[in-house]
Image (spheres, grey):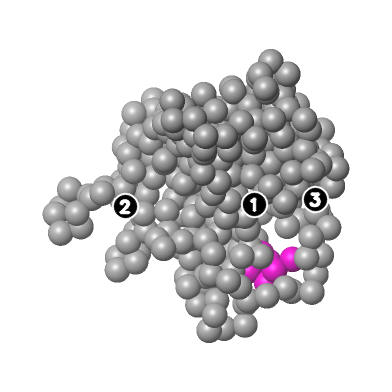
Amino acid sequence: MNDLSTPDFKTLEQFIIEQQEMSGGATGAFSRLLRDLSVAAKVVNRDMRRAGLVDILGASGEVNVQGEVQQKMDALAHAEFVRALRRGGETCLIGSEEHAEAIPLDGDRPGEDGRYIVLLDPLDGSSNIDVNVSVGTIFSVYHLPEGAAPTLEAALQPGTEQVAAGYIVYGSSTILVYTTGNGVNGFTLEPSIGEFILSHPNIRTPETGTMYSVNEGNYNSFEDGLKRWIKWAQAEDKATARPYTTRYIGSFVSDFHRNLVKGGIYIYPASAKSPEGKLRLMYESNPMAFIVEQAGGMASNGRGRVMETQPTALHQRTPLYIGSKAMVEQVERFLAGEEG
C-alpha cells in the first residue's frame, strides 16, 4: 500500500499516461475512456456513501430487461456511466445490463475518436445496498471492428477480443481493478484528494485456495458432478487443507475480488431454475474472465474456456466457474466424471 505522506504514490491517471507512452502510436482515446469510467465511478461512490440519507435506497418499482426488480441505485449508476461515456466521445456503442437494447453514441460528438464499445453492469449486487453490503460495477471494452457500424452485431464479440476489462468495488474502501491484457492492477480511491491511487500493483491470484463461493441453497438442482465436488470440498483431509471454507456474499464483484486476492473459486452453475446459468456472458463473465486469466487464474463454463464462447445475444447468460486455476481445473474434472 502506498503511503500518501510521501511523494511517490501514483494516481490512476499517471499510471494510464505511463502505459500510453509505452504504446507506440497511441492516440490517447483509450486513456481518456478509462478516465471517463473512473470519473463515473467516483460519482457513483459519492451517491453510495449517501444512500441511507437520501431517497436512493430500495426498489424503483421498475423491472429491467433481465426480469429483475430494478433498484433505484441501478438506474442512477446506469445514467452516470452512460453520461460520462457520452460526454467523453471515445465510445460509439454502450451495452448495459439495465437497458434492453444497445445504445449507439456515434454522431453525438462529431470528430471525436468514438471507436470503442463498452459493456457494463452498472451496479452488480444492488439488492444488497439496503443492508450495507459491498456492491460493484463491471465493465468491458472492445474495439469497433474496422468498417463496421456501431450496432448490436458489432458488440457480439467473444471475450477473447476484449481490449480492457475491470471492476469497481464499493466497500470499506473503493477499489478499481482493471487489465488491458498486460497484467492486473488495483487502485484505491483516496477520498481526501479524490484520486484513485495505485495500491495493488501486478495482482497475481494464488494457484489454489481453500474457499469456495456458491449459493448452496440451490444444491438439489446442481448437476451430479458439482454435487460430488462440494461434498469432496466439505470432507475432512488435512493433506489437502479440507474442509474448505464457504464464503458467499451474494455480490459477484465482492466474492470475486476476495477470491482473486486470497485464492478460491466462485461458482454460479446451471440449475433447474436457471438452466443457462444466471450470470450474463457479456457484462459479468467475460470481463471477470479476462481479469482472472491475466492474474494467473482461470474461468470456465464447466466445459471449456468461457471467453471463447461466441455470443448470440447481448443479455446472454452462462454458467461460470472462476478463480484459482487448480480449483477450476479440478471442478471441471468432477463435472466430466473423472473424479468423485
Of tags 3 and 2, the one toward the viewer is 2
Amino acid type, callout 2: Ile
Q: What is the x, y in percent for residue 13? A: 35, 49
Q: What is the x, y in percent for residue 254? A: 52, 52
Give neighbour class at mark 3: few <14, some 14-19, many 20+ (Cα, 10 Å). some
**Quarter of the rendering containing residue 249:** bottom right
In percent of the image, x 74 and y 74: which residue is there? 60
Asked if the magenta segment contains residue 72, the reply would be yes
Of all residues, the one furthest to the top in this rendering is 338
Q: Which mark is residue 197?
A: 2
Amino acid type, callout 1: Asp
Q: Is residue 290 above or below residue 167?
A: above
Residue in the foreground of this view, choosing between 198 and 334: 334
- Residue at image mark 3: 101
The secondary structure that dominates the magenta segment is helix
Amino acid type, callout 3: Glu
* Left-right relation of 172 to 61: left
Of tags 3 and 1, the one toward the viewer is 1
Q: Quick one: label 3 or label 1, which is nearer the N terminus?
A: 3
- Label 3, label 1: how far apart the Cα atoms are: 14 Å
- Label 1, label 2: how far apart the Cα atoms are: 23 Å
* Secondary structure under the numbered disc 1 in the rendered image: strand
Q: Which quadrant does the C terminus fall into?
A: top right
Q: Which mark is residue 121?
A: 1
Q: What is the x, y in percent for residue 224? A: 77, 30
In percent of the image, x 78 and y 33: which residue is there? 223
What stretch of residues is rendered in magenta? 70-76
